């Protein structure tokens, strides 16, 4: 379970210094993270540990993460900003 302090830390870690990532991650943590399942919250935390270059490629849909759990959380983030 993630405390409010944990979520504040994640919000800080979401500031990557790359505008394309910041505009996806920061609002996601603020507005959507609390509503995720614990498993998806863990996937998001793992996603934040990835390299910015990989994150950029995945979130710009130029590549797909090989790890299905990371692929799932990337899709959750993208579906939030690109509703069908």
Image: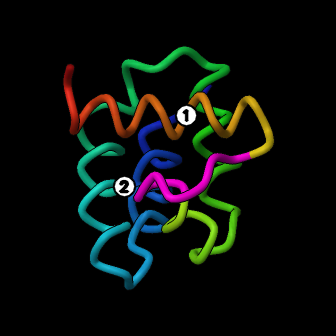
Q: Nearer the viewer, residue 58 or 27?
A: 58
- In the image: residue 27, left or right of residue 62: left
Residue at 37% x, 18% y is: 35
Q: Which residues are magenta?
A: 58-65
In the displayed structure, 14 sits above or below 17; it is: above
Which quarter of the rendered picture does the C terminus lie within?
Answer: top left
In the displayed structure, 61 sits above or below 4; it is: below
Q: Nearer the viewer, residue 3 or 73?
A: 73
Residue at 60% x, 55% y is: 63
Which sits earlier in the primary sequence, circle 1 or circle 2? Answer: 2
The residue lying furthest to the right in this view is 67
Q: Which residue is denoted by mark 1 in the rendering?
A: 73
Residue 55: assigned label: none
- Where residue 31 appears, as percent x and y from the top left, is 23, 36
Type of secondary structure dominating the magenta stretch: loop
Q: Which residue is denoted by mark 2 in the rendering?
A: 25
The quadrant holding residue 70 is: top right
The quadrant holding residue 41 is: top right
Residue at 61% x, 19% y is: 38
**How many residues crowd mark 2 within 10 Å: few (<14), some (14–19), many (20+)?**
many
Q: Secondary structure at mark 1?
A: helix
- In the image: residue 13, left or right of residue 43: left
């Amino acid at each position: 379970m993630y405390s409010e302090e944990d979520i504040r830390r994640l919000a800080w870690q979401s500031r990557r210094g790359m505008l394309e990532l910041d505009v996806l991650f920061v609002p996601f943590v603020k507005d959507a993270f609390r509503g995720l399942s614990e498993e998806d919250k863990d996937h998001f935390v793992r996603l934040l540990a990835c390299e910015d270059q990989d994150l950029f490629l995945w979130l710009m849909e130029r590549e797909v993460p090989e790890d299905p759990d990371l692929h799932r959380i990337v899709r959750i983030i993208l579906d939030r900003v690109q509703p069908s």
